[in-house]
Image (spheres, rainbow, N blue to C red):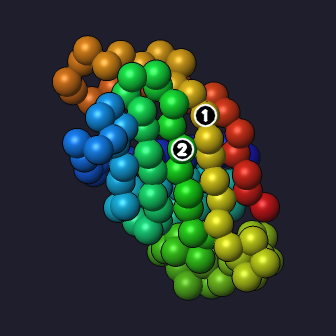
């Protein structure tokens, strides 16, 4: 099984934070390739933060807000697999390894860190 997770966000800067950006409307796309049927879900309730000066980043994802095409998939995901009532969120804290603060366009980067998820 192959799982791809994409994080996109509208970053909001503040003079108080300098090179730090925070998003309260991050979007996570979930894709899992499975033999019988591919599984996709979207979560637009995530929050994220990045420090441009050093590439450190973090995000928090409320599990119950993943929206699937099929209601039954969503129920199974929350009740049987993720147990979102017991484990309501997932977090990631890490470092972007190939980030350049000099580029003013979209970048594909790799982040290494700790993912906490049930």
Q: Residue at x 61, y 69 (%)?
A: 63
**Badge 2 density bin: few <14, some 14–19, many ≥20, Cα 10 Å:** some
Report the side of 91 relative to 1 (left or right).
left
Residue ID at (59%, 76%): 64
Q: Is residue 13 visible?
A: no
Quick check: can you spot residue 89?
yes
Residue 29 horizontal/vertical position (percent): 47, 55
The percent coordinates of residue 15 (x first, y second) are 23, 42
Residue 3 lies, with reference to residue 20, above or below; the image says below
Outermost residue, front side: 16
Please name whichever residue, 22 or 33, is drawn nearer the observer in this view of the structure: 22
Q: Which residue is mark 2?
A: 58
Label 1 secondary element: strand
| Badge 2 element | strand
- The residue that mark 1 highlights is 94
Task: State the residue at coordinates (51%, 31%).
Answer: 56
Tag count in the figure? 2
Residue 17: horizontal and vertical position, in percent? Answer: 33, 41
């Amino acid at each position: 099984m192959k799982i791809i997770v994409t994080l996109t966000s509208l970053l909001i800067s503040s003079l108080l934070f300098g090179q730090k950006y925070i998003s309260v409307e991050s979007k996570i796309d979930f894709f899992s390739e499975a033999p019988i049927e591919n599984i996709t879900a979207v979560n637009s309730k995530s929050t994220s933060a990045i420090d441009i000066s050093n590439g450190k980043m973090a995000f928090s994802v409320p599990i119950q807000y993943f929206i699937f095409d099929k209601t039954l998939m969503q129920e199974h995901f929350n009740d049987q697999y993720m147990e979102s009532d017991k484990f309501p969120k997932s977090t990631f804290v890490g470092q972007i390894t190939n980030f350049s603060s000099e580029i003013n366009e979209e970048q594909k980067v790799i982040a290494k860190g700790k993912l906490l998820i049930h």
